[in-house]
Image (cartoon, rainbow, N blue to C red):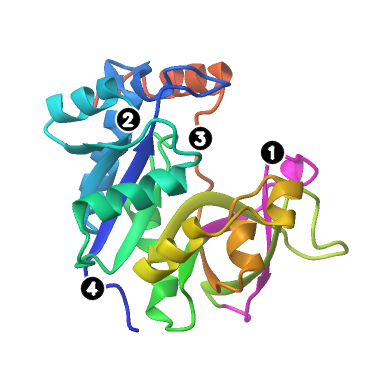
């Protein structure tokens, strides 16, 4: 296998979020959150962009903006399952060799980050990839700031994931890396991933990517320059509304 030749970006979205109901349709400076994310993905120009919808209202919002959307079972257990279901509906023959799972909570993801998540897949040993940045020291003990332990050569921009945790790992002196939930999968790896039951580490840490690690799926990690701003709570939403008040598009 070589570098991705024909990626597809799929954004999973549903309305039934516990902490922030109706999040995808939340208005930010006159534009629904999900439409902002879709536009960022289109601008990045890494491949076809589709929103995998669990609700008809999301599909309508994307199509009104000129985007492509597909309905999926609203009862699917995770965003990865929704992405996989959409990929099989849209492309059952596997013409898209890599699927990017862009979660629907990052309203201002930049093009460089979307391109970066594909770079580990230029290395044939990696079947799945994600991104991380140096951890802000103020977040090192925050269980909501997920850490990734990396095997990373000096000066390298891509490393191999050894473990993901909510704990402060590794211990001792040295950098910590802050993981963000942007993923790219080779098609076979995505099919394998969603076919697996949750593992014990995944259940214990409440981190879906540990299912891949427990199954022996190698994960490459691309380093990015800045953290991603995620919208998961009403406070996050108000922050984005303030930051983007003068940016309607």
Which one is in front, 38 or 43? 38
Query: For the residue labelled by badge 3, is the local secondary structure a helix, a strand or a loop?
Result: loop
Q: Please give the residue where the numbered disc 2 appears in the rendered image.
A: 34
> Is there a contact, CB below 8 Å, between mark 1 and mark 2?
no
Mark 3 or mark 1: name the one nearer the start of the chain. Answer: 1
Q: Please give the residue where the numbered disc 3 appears in the rendered image.
A: 230
Q: Which residues are magenta?
A: 131-155
Question: Which mark is drawn over residue 144?
Answer: 1
How packed mark 3 is, by other alpha carbons closer than 10 Å (few <14, some 14-19, many 20 or more), is some
Q: CA distance from mark 3 to mark 1?
A: 12 Å
Q: Is residue 224 visible?
A: no
On screen, 108 above or below 64?
below
Mark 1 or mark 2: name the one nearer the start of the chain. Answer: 2
From the viewer's perspective, tell me whether residue 25 is left or right of residue 182.
left
Mark 4 or mark 1: name the one nearer the start of the chain. Answer: 4
Query: For the residue labelled by badge 4, is the local secondary structure a helix, a strand or a loop?
Result: loop
């Amino acid at each position: 296998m070589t570098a991705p030749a024909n990626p597809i970006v799929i954004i999973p979205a549903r309305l039934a979020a516990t902490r922030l109901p109706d999040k995808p349709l939340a208005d930010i400076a006159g534009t629904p959150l999900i439409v902002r994310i879709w536009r960022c993905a289109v601008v990045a120009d890494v491949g076809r962009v589709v929103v995998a919808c669990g609700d008809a209202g999301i599909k309508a919002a994307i199509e009104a903006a000129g985007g492509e959307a597909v309905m999926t079972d609203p009862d699917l257990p995770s965003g990865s399952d929704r992405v996989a279901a959409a990929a099989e509906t849209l492309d059952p023959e596997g013409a898209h060799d890599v699927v990017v799972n862009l979660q629907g909570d990052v309203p201002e993801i930049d093009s460089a980050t979307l391109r970066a998540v594909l770079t580990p897949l230029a290395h044939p040993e990696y079947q799945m990839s994600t991104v991380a940045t140096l951890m802000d020291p103020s977040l090192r003990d925050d269980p909501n700031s997920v850490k990734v332990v990396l095997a990373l050569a000096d000066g390298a921009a891509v490393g191999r994931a050894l473990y993901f945790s909510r704990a402060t790992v590794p211990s001792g002196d040295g950098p910590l890396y802050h993981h963000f939930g942007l993923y790219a999968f080779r098609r076979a790896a995505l099919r394998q991933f969603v076919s697996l039951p949750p593992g014990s580490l995944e259940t214990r840490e409440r981190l879906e990517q540990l299912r891949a690690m427990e199954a022996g799926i190698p994960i490459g990690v691309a380093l990015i320059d800045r953290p991603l701003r995620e919208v998961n709570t009403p406070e996050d939403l108000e922050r984005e509304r303030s930051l983007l008040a003068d940016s309607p598009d």
